[in-house]
Amino acid sequence: QVQLVESGGGLVQPGGSLRLSCTASGIIFSITNMAWYRQAPGKERELVARISDGGNTNYLDSVKGRFTISRDNAKKTVYLQVNSLKLEDTAVYYCNAGSYWGQGTLVTVSS
C-alpha cells in the first residue's frame, strides 16, 4: 500500500518561509520521480516543482528562486523549502509520486 504523508504547512506572513515534507512508503523511493503540486481555492491544481530520481529539478516559473525541492532517499522523503512567500502562494500543497497523491498540507500566507 502506497502512502505519501505531507507535513509542514501552516500560517505564515508574507515574506516568511516554511519547509514542507513528504514521507513515502510502499514505493521504491530512490527510483521514483517526485513532485509537489498546489491547488488554490477556485483554481486548478498546478505543478510547483519536481525532482527526478537522479536529482534533476524543474520549477513553476512563478516560484523559481524562492522554492527549492530536494530529496533524501535514505529517509524516503521529499522536501519543498518555500521562501519569500507571497499571498498568491496560499494553497493546499500535494506530494505526488506518479499516480499516487498525498492528502495535502495547507499553506496560508496572510498578514
Image: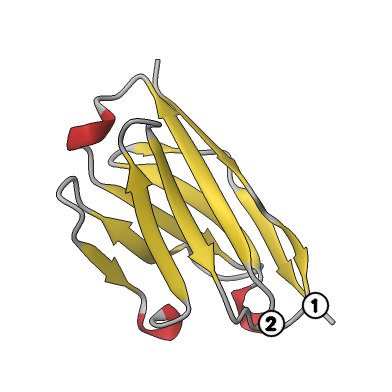
Residue in view at x 26 percent, y 69 percent? 58
Distance (Cα) linking label 1 and label 2: 6 Å
Give x and y (percent) for residue 32: 22, 38
Left or right: residue 97 compared with residue 39: left
Give x and y (percent) for residue 79: 45, 51
Quarter of image, res 50: bottom left
The residue carrying pointer 2 sits among few (fewer than 14), some (14 to 19) or many (20 or more) residues within 10 Å by Cα, namely some
Position above or below: 45 against 20: below
Do the residues under discs 1 and 2 have CB atoms within 8 angstroms? yes
Position above or below: 11 against 77: below
Position above or below: 34 against 30: below
Quadrant containing the N terminus in the rendered view: top left
Q: Amino acid at mark 1?
A: Ser
Q: Amino acid at mark 2?
A: Leu
N-terminal label among 1 and 2: 2
Total label count? Answer: 2
Give x and y (percent) for residue 100: 37, 35
Residue in view at x 63 percent, y 63 percent? 18
Label 1 element class? loop
The residue singled out by tag 1 in the image is 110
Which numbered tag is attached to residue 87?
Answer: 2
